[in-house]
Image (cartoon, rainbow, N blue to C red):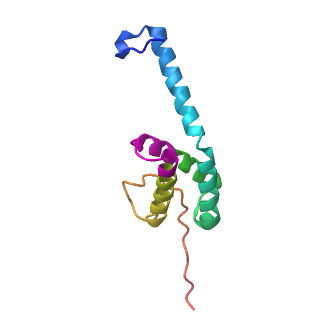
Amino acid sequence: MEIAKSIEDLEPQAAVDNCAESTRKWHEKVLSYAHLVRRWTSYFWKINKAYLYSYEDLEQTIWYILMVGLQEFDGRGDEEQFLNWYIRNKIVFCNHVRQKTSKMCTFTIHTYKVRLRLAG
């Protein structure tokens, strides 16, 4: 298949096929980093489970962070090392500011448990 210079140059079916192929490649690339998602989910769950909603929410958040990291990767250096650093730093940052509003962390993976201090 010949690569078109713009979407208008493509036939309707060719545009659909091109989009489907692009989507398939993106899914394959994202899923190739499942080992990073499993590792970081397991690690952060072990050390923070008292403050997290659920393992599944944490895992979903890490998948989201991975996809954002893939889009932000600029091609310099090793992609997997970048994603490893990116996931770690985003989750640590969200843990650090979990009780503050931040535009860098627009989602939450934490429960805000109220700790009562007993007078005594």
30 is within the stretch colored magenta: no
Considering depth in this image, is 65 or 112 the residue closer to the camera?
A: 65
| Residue drawn at x 47%, y 50% as measured from the top left | 82
Q: Dividing the image into 4 quarters, which one contains the C terminus? A: bottom right
Tell me: residue 81, above or below residue 110. Answer: above
Q: Is residue 73 above or below residue 18?
A: below
Q: Nearer the viewer, residue 5 or 67?
A: 5
* Residue 13 coordinates in the image, percent (x, y): 49, 9
Give, as a single range, the part of the protein colored magenta: 65-82
- On screen, residue 74 above or below 21: below
Residue at image x 37%, y 16%?
A: 7
Residue furthest front in the image: 77
Quarter where residue 6 is shown: top left
Q: Position of residue 67 (x, y in %)?
A: 49, 42
Measured as percent of width and height from the top left, residue 11 is found at: 43, 7
Does the magenta stretch mainly form a helix, a strand or a loop? Answer: helix
